[in-house]
Image: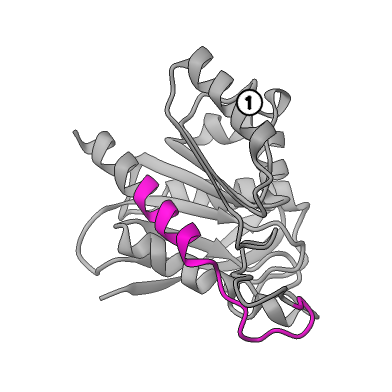
Amino acid sequence: MVVSVEVEFHAGPFSLAGQIDYPNEADTFPALLIVPGAPQHDRFGNVRGYSAYNNYLEALKDTLIDAGYAVFRWDKGGTGKSSSGLSAPMNMVSAYRKLTGMDRVDRTRIGILAIAGGSAHVYRKWGELQEINATQQLILLSTGVNDLKLEDLEVPIGLLMGNGEILRSQRALDRYSEQKKLPVMYYSELNASEQLFDITKGKVNLFNALDAKWHPSILEKLKGWIIERSNLQQA
């Protein structure tokens, strides 16, 4: 049974709140930190004024839990139970530090999952994050990559995008994999929007779409990738 634990931590003088979800109450787990893009995400993925993001992160969390991972999320500064906080990148570093120090988290199998603009925070603070704890995998959702973004990284990378806009990112990842001898995965779903919502039945209205859902193939590909990474790390 999934166990959710309320978490408090600090970024400078500011108090931030979040939670970690474990697949069960007994074991130690690999873990993923979710870094959303929109500035006003709470831990569940809600964004004020955009009804399509109604608990947007819950299906993602469930997918990661099903793959055997603990999942750490937090209320961005000014949302949920968090105070105003510092800058988004600095808050992310504080969240990563908190995650890596938790008792039931396997520090040798910690990864980051960044959504859209959240990837910019990861690139900006990559060196600082690695000083805290080596990241074992980086998953990027709804964001492209290029050679410049990848040049300082040394980590397996999975990339999932919508709308078929992946050719340039695919080439960059292939070069990255060849140069650094690290595995990569990329997938683009034509029937997913830029936000990875299912658009099989038509375009999603971000301001008035309480039934917006992730495209199922995105979640399936994501689950397959992280299970594969977990199996290789355990081998």
Q: What residue is disc 1 on?
A: 172
User: Is 27 included in the stretch rendered in magenta?
Assistant: no
Q: Secondary structure at mark 1?
A: helix
Front position in the image: 124 or 94 = 124
Mark 1 neighbour class, 10 Å CA radius: few under 14, some 14 to 19, many 20 or more: many
Picture residue at 35% right of the left edge, 64% below the top = 65
Picture residue at 69% right of the left edge, 45% below the top = 165
Picture residue at 58% right of the left edge, 25% below the top = 153
Answer above or below: position of 125 versus 46. above
Front position in the image: 10 or 58 = 58
Where's residue 222, x and y in %? Answer: 44, 53
- Looking at the rendering, the stretch of residues picked out in magenta corresponds to 205-225
Res 54 quadrant in image? bottom right
Query: Is residue 80 something one can see in this rendering?
Result: no
Front position in the image: 112 or 63 = 63
Where's residue 45, x and y in %? Answer: 62, 71
Give the residue type at disc 1.
Ala
Residue farthest to the top, as pictured: 179
Where's residue 198, x and y in %? Answer: 59, 70
Image quadrant holding the C terminus, namely top left
Picture residue at 40% right of the left edge, 64% below the top = 63
User: Is 222 included in the stretch rendered in magenta?
Assistant: yes
Image quadrant holding the N terminus, namely bottom left
